[in-house]
Image (cartoon, rainbow, N blue to C red):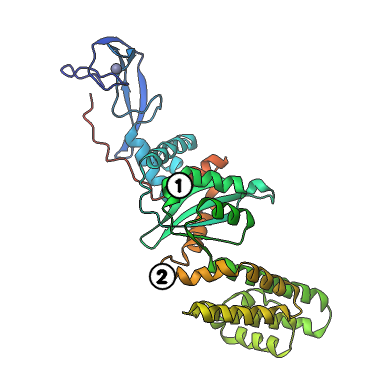
Amino acid sequence: MAPHGGLPAKCSLCHKAAPGYDRLPERWWLFVPVWGVATSFRYAPRRVECPQDGVVEEEIPWSQGKRPVTVAMMGFLSRWARRLSWRETARAFDTSWECVYRSVDWYVQWGLAHRKLEGVKSIGVDDLHWGQSKGANSFLTVIYQIDTHCRRLLWVGKKRTQATLRRGLAALGSEVVGGLRFVCSDMWRPYLNVIAAKASQALHVLDRFHITMHLNQAVDQVRRAESTRLRGHPMAERLKKMRWKLLRKGSRVRGRAKHKLCGLLYAKLGTGRAWMLKETFQDFWRYRSLFWAKAFLDVWTTRALRSRLEPMQKVARMLRSHEKLILNWFKAKGEISNAAVEGLNNKIRVVTRRSYGFRTYDAMEIALYHTLGKLPEPDEFTHTFC
Ligand SMILES: [Zn+2]
C-alpha cells in the first residue's frame, strides 16, 4: 500500500493533519482472508511533525498501535471465536492462538469501554467453582444483570470473598449500585454482608434456585450416609442407583423409576423422608400471600427439625435464620426472572469447559465477557485506505 498523494497524513494523537517528517520501515498487517487466501497489508508508515505533539507516527485507521493485525481482522476473528473455540478459530484461519486471544481482548476492551449500564435494576450475585483444585483461587464471583429485558454478565472476578464482591460493585460504579432495586444471591455470608453494606436500598432476595440446591444436597447427604450404614443389609438394594432420581423434581420421575421411588417411601427409610421434605418445599414457591408463605415456612422447618435427619435440620436452621430474605422473594415476584442466575451459570460452565484452551485466568475472563457480556461491537470497519 502507498500513501494517498492528495491526502495529508494525520497525527495519531490529535487526529489533525500535519506535515510529513520521514518514513518508518515497512510493516505487515494480517487482513481478513480473501477467497480463502491469507491476505496481508504491507505499508511503511509515515511520521509527521505535529505542531502540538512533535514527531509522531501518523494515524492509520485500520491499525491499532503496534498490533500486526488489522482492525477488520481482529473483528473477524473475534466473531468467529464466539462460535468456535479459540484454538479452532486459529486453525481455521491459519493464525496463532495468541493472535486470536489478542483480537478478542481488544474487542472486549472496546466493548467494556463503550457498554451502557443505565437501566440495570436487578442483579444476581453468585460464586462458581472453576479449575481443578478446591482452593480459594478456583472460585469465581460473578455479577449478572437479571432484568427481564436484559440478562447478561456484568462482572467476573477471582475468589469469593467480601473483597471480591466489593471490587465488582466498585467496577460497576456507585451510580449503578445506587440505582439497584433487587439483588439476588445465595446465603453465602461474605456476599450477604457486602450487599447489606453497599446496596442497602435494594431488596435482597435469596434465590429460589440456590435454596433448591441446598435441599438437594441435603437429600444426597442423607442418602449417602444411609447407604453406608445399611451396607450388606437387604434394604440397601432400595438405595442403589437412586441418586439422580432423588434429585429430580418428583413430578418428572416416571415409569419404573417412580415405582422404585414409591418403594423407597414405603420402606420408611430416612432417605425417603428427606425426599418427601424436599418435595413438599416446592409448594412454598406457589404462595401468593406473604402471610401464608411465612406460615408454611414455619410448619415446614418445624417438621424438618423433628425429622432426626441432620442434613435436613441444617437446611431448616439455615432457612429460619434467613427467613426475611427468603420471604423477600414474594415481594420481588414477577420483577426478576428466577431462573436467570441458573441459566447464566450453565452458560458459563460451557465456556469454562471449553477453557481447556484458555491458558490463563485472564484469557478465560475475556472469553466470558466475550460470550455472555452482550457487549456492543465496534461499527463495521469501513475506512478509506490511504
Ligand atoms: Zn498532534
> Which corner quadrant holds the C terminus?
top left
Q: Position of residue 164 (x, y in %)?
A: 58, 46
As helix, strand or loop, the secondary structure at mark 2 comes to loop
* Neighbour tally class for label 1: few under 14, some 14-19, many 20 plus, Cα within 10 Å: many
- Which disc, if any, is residue 369? 1
**Residue in view at x 45 percent, y 45 percent:** 174
As helix, strand or loop, the secondary structure at mark 1 comes to helix
Q: Please name whichever residue, 120 or 263, is drawn nearer the observer in this view of the structure.
A: 120
Q: Position of residue 16 (x, y in %)?
A: 24, 20
Name which residue type carries label 1.
Answer: Tyr
* Neighbour tally class for label 2: few under 14, some 14-19, many 20 plus, Cα within 10 Å: few
The total number of labels drawn is 2
Q: Position of residue 101 (x, y in %)?
A: 47, 38
**Residue in view at x 38 percent, y 42 percent:** 111
Name which residue type carries label 2.
Answer: Gly
Where on the picture, by quarter, is residue 264? bottom right
Mark 1 and mark 2: span between their CA atoms?
Answer: 27 Å
| Circle 2 residue | 334
Between marks 1 and 2 in the image, the one whose residue lies nearer the viewer: 2
> Which corner quadrant holds the N terminus?
top left
